[in-house]
Image (cartoon, grey):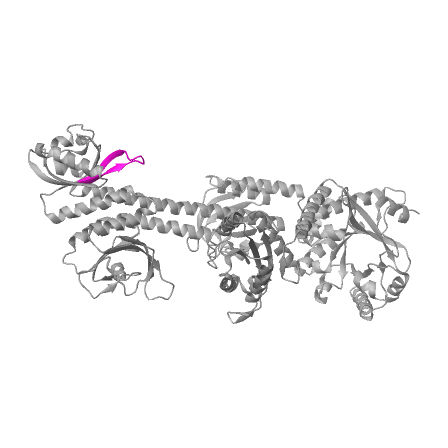
Amino acid sequence: MHTKNDAADIFRQLAEGVGNSGSPRFYATLVERLATILGVDHVLVADVTQLHRAETLAVWSDGGLVSNITYSLAGTPCETALGRECCLYPRDVQSRFPDDKLLCELGAESYLGRALYAADGALIGLLAVLKNSPMQQGDLANEILHIAAAQAGAELGRQKAEQALRESEEVARESERRLDTLLNHLPGMAYRCLNDRAWTMQLVSQGAEVLTGYRPDELQGNRLISFAALIHPDDQDKVFHEVQSAIANRRPYRVIYQLRHRDGGYRWMWEQGQAVMDEAGDIICLEGFISDMTDQQESQRVQNAVVQVASTVTTQVGDGYFQQLIATLVKVLEADAGFIALLHTSPQGDESVYGKATTVSMVVDGAQREPYTFALRGSPSEQVVLEREAVMHDGPPLLLPGTLLPTRAWIGRRLDNANGEAIGVMMVFYRQPLTTNAFATSVLQILSTGAAAELERRRDHRHMHQLAYTDSTTGLPNRIRFMELLAEIWQEAHQAGSGLSLLLLDIRRFKEVNDLHGHQVGDQLLVTVADRLAKLSRSYGSLARLSGDEFALLVADTTPSGIGDLAEQLRLAVKPPLHLERRVFHLDVSIGFAHYPQDVSESGELFNAASIALHHAKRRENSICPYTQTMRHALQRRQRMTERLSAAITEHRLELYFQPQVNLTSGRLTGAEALCRWHDAEWGWVSPGEFIPLAEERGLIRALGDWVLEESARQLLAWREQPEGGLPGRLSINISAQQFADPELTRHIGQLTAGVSPSAIALELTESDFMRDPDQAVEITHTMRQAGYALSIDDFGTGYSSLSYLRRFAADALKIDISFVREMLDNHHDRTIVQTIIAMAQALEMKTVAEGVETRDQASLLAEMGCNEAQGYWFGRPLPADKFAAQWLTT
């Protein structure tokens, strides 16, 4: 059992182990720290992206890191660990999995594994710890493994996301390379030059050598000759003035002139370009393309179109990329309309692979249109997808999707990703029939590569955004997106001086559905509940799934009374029976809500207030609860009490009181019960009924239980040194359910009570705690009896234990609950229950101890019934150690 300081140190070590995400040694550090913290011999973390294969990322074995391995999951405990819960094989794991060679090589006796999940819930890996001796899964070990698995999953998910991003960037770089290759293999010369009389070249494509006979490096910077010097003398002034005139009018320039080749001959050139200007309007450079007009006119037109569109591709970034691309393309190809559309894969069951397409940019008669989604089946785009490239010269009038434009001709080119898979289409449309398509087809073919690369990048970005901000199960905004919405909507409400309400909803007993019927049914239930809530909430505000079975709804401009009505409507919307997989589920929701500005003044406070209200709604029968300041004060008190109780345990500011236990026949003292008391310097006496349940809830009960055991042992030793010889009989000490869950509890108690004979101690556990895990309780109680401790079942009659288990428990005594003793004189049923418990104990050779005896009549009746011992105010109230000794331990 770990003390609070031990636990804090463990979590500090764990935090140091997982705090270096992004570091190459993240996994190595993690497995080393887990091995140290959990005291195990082997730890491994592995990637399981391939079906039934695991590739380890780090392996710690017998005190050091070992080489990574790849192994099949079939026939290994790792295969069974790929679920949502921890998978534990406490012993004999090799005999359970005889085909797992790794277990044999490691010498493992026990195994504890947990699956790793990415942010979208996808299974991506596993974390396993192995020990060469038996191992048990305590709460602390489970929490440590849960935290480590969450961090390892997040790190592995982050690495995979980075890999996907790198691959996407590689696609973009490959597209740039292709475009560069394309320009450098076109029958012409692309260039960038200064706007001077020499046309000083800064960048020249490889086509310059074919065009002029000079290599690009000979033209760049006028190294061998200036480009202006190659222009025919009769054309030099004309070219210069036409270019300057076009620049002054902020339009592209087009010039035709003769150019002297290196071989001395002249050829006709057609040049088009434009000035690149900075924000101040100053000319940075000129960019353009030069082609040889000596060849056929069609080739020249292609180059002309490519230059115009290529300048758009190379100089435009951001949202305007596709808009300017398709606008320029429609203009160059003299089309009436055109679009670039993204394909969507169809839902399962559709006849075709692609069901719909959405335009990312569409131009009709020179004007941009809004995005439009249309069915692919039966459209020209479907033919383009199937054939990669398609043309309709003259067909029946067809309305362009999302418009009233009748078209009779069209040309389309499929856009593929780096794997050759169709992701979009690029098309132009004409009102009139086409006589030829060679020119347009060539232009579309040349430009499709760059357009496809940008479309893939946009799609990947959109997909990553969806993964980051959308709940994969319900399709609703997730917690991250909801918190952003909360900040945005609160800011709008704050500036407008209007109200804002937040409702948090939690499905009651949803965990039971998951545990009993599995996560698949649980997910279907979540989807159905989300749909019901969405139908009602759509007209009110923004709905999101925060986590698990918790939903949130933001509602602007509404009154607190209106929100109460809405909460009731939401509850009623969930109430109708749900029919899933031939089962019927009857659900209810807990709803907590708060308002701005009535309850809080900030967005973060609004969420906190609604969470507090939801917490109270879960604990009340009335499942709808508005926030009040009283709730916050109660929560603050509980938080403050947790802090002060933790300090009181650590600083030994608690005190033990002792209540006598008396033989009902002789009236002699037979022992005592140790009871914890707390006097706080600020609050005075704090009721055990308040601070003990709080300790159980906030994880302090083990530390408190350790203190009680140690202090009890110290007091027993102190009394033993007195002349009277110490406490007769045994001192009864209560053990919490959380302590009892520790398989090593008997050994731990022995360490805490060193120096005190086990025969001087009786351990008490409530009947309901026994029944949490009866089989384990049987095993632990037998271990305690073998060690010499007496064992009592406290509050007997309230926990519904079965006789079969009661017979197997190695208990010495049954303690009759005070609720039966208090009313047994006046209530025939309670008297019958007490008599039955006594008879049952006698049959099982156990003694009985009655609690809460406050009158002589109660004591007399219990003695007549055959009850052995009793405690209560009639015999003596709980007293501090010195007063107890003075009253009960003196001769």
Q: Image check: 861 left or right of 138?
A: right
Residue drawn at point x = 48 percent, y = 59 percent: 474
Percent of width and height locating residue 619: 66, 58
In the image, the segment drawn in magenta is: 272-289
Q: Is residue 136 visible?
A: no
Q: Is residue 305 magenta?
A: no
Q: Is residue 348 visible?
A: yes
Nearer to the camera, 590 or 66: 590
Main SS class of the magenta portion in the image: strand
Percent of width and height locating residue 550: 55, 57
Q: Image check: 650 left or right of 375?
A: right
Percent of width and height locating residue 653: 76, 41
Q: Residue furthest top?
A: 223
Percent of width and height locating residue 232: 9, 33
Q: Image check: 840 left or right of 629?
A: right
Nearer to the camera, 811 or 386: 386
Q: How many marks?
A: 0
Q: Image check: 459 left or right of 189?
A: right
Residue drawn at point x = 50 percent, y = 46 percent: 152
Q: Quadrant of residue 830?
A: bottom right
Q: Is residue 277 magenta?
A: yes
